[in-house]
Image (cartoon, rainbow, N blue to C red):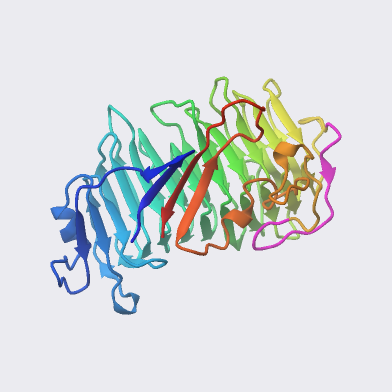
Amino acid sequence: MKKILTLLTVFCGFLTAYSADLYVNEFGTGGAYSTVSAALSAASSGDRILIQPKSGNASYVENLSISNPVQLLCTDNNSQWTLTGNETFGTVTAGGLYVISGMNNLSGTLTCSTGPTSGNRAILKFMGCDWASTVIDVSDNNMDVQFAGCNITHSGSGSTVVSLKNADMFGCTVSFSGSSIIGISVATDATSGSDSCLFVANRIVNTSSTSSPNNMFYWNSTSHYYVLLNNFFKMATSGSYTVSNAPVNFNTSKSGSGYNAVINNTVVNTASSPQLYYGLYFYNSQNSPVNVYNNLINGAIAYPIYRSATSNNFACSYNGYSGTWYSSSITNDGTNFSYSGGYNSTTGAASTSNNGWNHPAMYDLDLTRNDIGTYGGSFSFTNYFSQTGSTRIYWVDAPRSVIQNNTIYIKADGWDR
């Protein structure tokens, strides 16, 4: 049975109390409902709806309309219930917790039309879910959205696969094919926050050889800071390209005393030609400090890292790259280096090791010097792929270094599959 877990240093408990358990199975036997929609209609705020997979993984064929804060969970460990249909959140409740876990959607979209207009943010969590041939739009205001261990696929052209505002994504795969597609887009939220949007150990892959590439990750938010750790961005170009079609594009950033981080990511263009202009593209003014460390930019990319404005605090060190360093944009401090080794085409791992920043805070899991790319540092792909076992801790918020005799605070988020 699935539960949402939170760990706070020495305390472990449920993230929220639930009111009642409602059951769904394919025949509606034993007091259960035969459809998820019927259970949703009967549910009250805080209820859990426990859904039993149908025989042979057959689908519950229905569109789900979700209004009350409820949890939709699979009854079986390490399994999924299957849906063919859309999930639509209406006006979500301020401070409400909405959860979908262990769902496999064969065909349908995920949308949230209206966030709260006052009060606390609504919390939407999607864990261990798969969506096939879909578009996800949970980009309304005043919501805290989180994806963990999810697989999202899309085919077509001219779409954004995942649209977000205030959101985190851990250990997910976003795979799409076609031209002029943006993989993940993040826009400005109506309520600014001092926290960061976390994108950790995700695989963002354009599986087609496209003549019209677009951004695989597009940041256009001034309401939150961005933190990208150990992500793998892979694409292939076959035709013309423009400056704006960098795989990873930061169009702006939040103003404030916080910082943005782009650390231990791998960005590759697998085509032999033509080259993309840039791998990591910092466009316009970045309004707060940016730390760019230990990234691997490889393949047919002319200039690995580019920024168009020079007035901000921009730290760029220990990045490995193919192509040419754009010295008029970013002065190489002597630690960024030409990388002639390969990478793992599935995980983005660099073929050579121990060539990232040798600071102890950046050490790998084996306590050796940082490896550039997705397997370096504390948030290595090792923590996320492949997923085994029923319990998953997908994020640990802890300091990179500890001062003796000081109190440290550690928070972890996870769920029981």
Vertical comparison of 417 with 182: above or below? below
Q: Residue at x 83, y 31 (%)?
A: 333
Q: Is residue 149 visible?
A: no
User: Would you say residue 167 sits in the magenta stretch?
Assistant: no
- Placement of 61 over or under 72, stated as above or below: below
Residue at 52%, 59% (x, y): give it.
176
Task: Identify the image quadrant of residue 41.
Answer: bottom left
Task: Tell which of 207 and 238 is nearer to you.
Answer: 207
**Residue 276 % position (x, y):** 70, 49
Answer above or below: position of 196 versus 201.
above
Q: What are the residue bounds of the magenta stretch?
A: 333-349
Residue most extreme to the bottom: 56
Visible in this render: residue 36? yes
Residue 338 is covered by the magenta coloring: yes
Q: Which of 310 and 143 is in front in this view?
A: 143
Q: Tell me the quarter of the image containing the C terminus.
A: bottom left
Please report the residue visible at 35 percent of the width from the left and 43 percent of the height from the top.
Answer: 15
In the image, residue 52 lies at what x, y percent? 28, 68
Quarter occupied by residue 1: bottom left
Answer left or right for 197 relative to 286.
left
Nearer the observer, 119 or 408: 408
Number of numbered tags placed on the structure image:
0
Find residue 86 and report its horizontal and vertical position in percent: 30, 58
Q: Is the magenta stretch mostly helix, strand or loop?
A: loop
Would residue 171 appear left or right of 373 to someone viewing this image? Answer: left
- Above or below, 244 against 194 in this view is below
Taking the spot 38% from the left edge, 65% from the top edge, the residue there is 104
Pinpoint residue 399: horizontal percent, then vertical percent.
60, 34
In front: 413, or 202? 413
